[in-house]
Amino acid sequence: MNPVSFISLNGTLHCEQVALTTIAQEFGTPTYVYSRAAIEAAFNSFARAAAGRGVLLCFAMKANSNLAVLDLLARQGAGFDIVSGGELERALAVGGDPARIVFSGVGKSRTEIRRALEIGVKCFNVESEAELDRIDTIARALGRRAPISIRVNPDVDAGTHPYISTGLKENKFGIAHDRVRAVYAHAAGLKGIEILGIDCHIGSQIVEAAPFLDALDRVLALADLLESDGIALQHLDLGGGLGIRYDSETPPDRGEFLTQLLDRVDRWRSVHPNRANVEVIFEFGRALVAEAGLLLTRVEYLKDNGSRHFAVVDAAMNDLMRPALYEAWHPVQAVVARHDRPIQEYDLVGPVCESGDWLARARALALAEDDLLAIGCAGAYGMTMASNYNTRARPAEVLVDGARVHVARPRESVQELFASERPLPPA
């Protein structure tokens, strides 16, 4: 958890100036709690390093697409990286500038492409030759030229979980490194296509700079070859994927990391004067919001099966999918420190009828029923991956700003979950 925004005061964990006990009392549990100060601090650490260096910082909104979070980042000057038509509409709903929206993703539908062209997104990151031809066809039908980058798969091992690695040959993303020049040559001959840049994204939760630098070197070498082919690029899209500390990871400082990459780009820019205005695009998600959020949950029951101790909480895998999906580790902290119970190793499990419904394992905690727990680093890929499995209403979301609490999304009611469904007509 962010050590500045989530602090213990008088034995009670707070988000900024608001006690989590107060939030639980007012909004119930489970509830996602976000810190405005933490989000702004994370964005500003990148923005300071990027200032004056021809950079567009986009937020990869698949990490957290709540309108309050998007609005906050738009006010800070962020663009948006989207992967669906739904995310496009969310970005527009908070006043996002289409000219600062990058459309990524491997499966863009005709409807999504048409809508993005009509409102004028900055660029499509093209993931396949079939997609390139589809975009060309739709653009010509609309009497337009579609701005595109080709996403190159550089075959770089990001050293992360296989489910969130995207830069290897066996991954579904991008176009193979050895096919890229041919695809650009094809794109250059399409009347509905305008080539703007080159794109690369090698994965998520990467906690060292080396894979990024390796991928960057390959992208710059490709840019040189494309230049020799007569294709001048207007931007380099270097993606995102910088990780955070969930447990013992040691990711690089955000500003130092960005400076390291931009220094290498500046050396490449300096070789030829016509490269001076080549823009650099980044698309960070987790690094901006993960540490700014936690999932507040309450202990329903304590259970002992003889060999393991279980804390059954009111949050579940449908609320926070990452542990079940990735065996991900999240920090867990009691909201109010308890000194009248022994510390034991607990597995935190939820009410969902699956053995995979667990949120943390073997955590040393002193607990009693009805205690509140904070599951940290849950601001990314928490609510965006939540579901209604077992007909469970998804959590509320609140954003804390100093001493104020903004209801970013009220808790769903069970009735809302099936309000649009219809039973069979009478026999």
Image: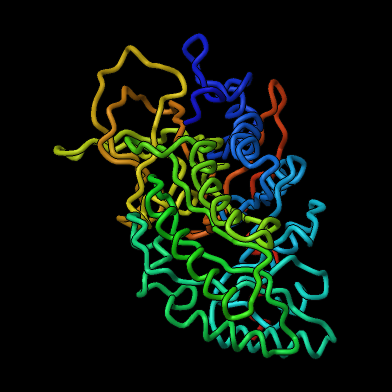
Query: 258 above or below 422?
Result: above
Badge count: 0
Identify the residue at the far left of this view.
307
Instruction: Give how far across and how far down residue 422 sits, in percent.
Output: 67, 74
Identify the residue at the far top of this view.
10
Asked which quadrant contains residue 252, the reply is top left
Depth check, front residue: 241 or 152: 152
Query: 379 above or below 133?
Result: above
Residue under the point 65% across and 52% down: 58
Instruction: Give how far across and how far down residue 166 sits, in percent.
Output: 43, 65
Residue under the point 70% across and 68% down: 123
Depth check, front residue: 218 or 351: 218
Residue under the point 15% across and 37% down: 306
**Quarter of the C terminus within the rendering:** bottom right
Q: How is the image coloured?
A: rainbow
Query: 390 above or below 250?
Result: below
Relative to 343, is 230 on the left or the right? right
Instruction: Give how far across and how far down residue 372 sits, in percent.
Output: 46, 28
Query: 414 above or below 329?
Result: below
Depth check, front residue: 290 or 241: 241
| Res 65 seen here | yes
| Res 295 seen here | no
Residue under the point 54% across and 71% down: 151
Asked which quadrant contains residue 35, the reply is top right
Instruction: Give how far across and how far down residue 387 sits, in percent.
Output: 53, 58
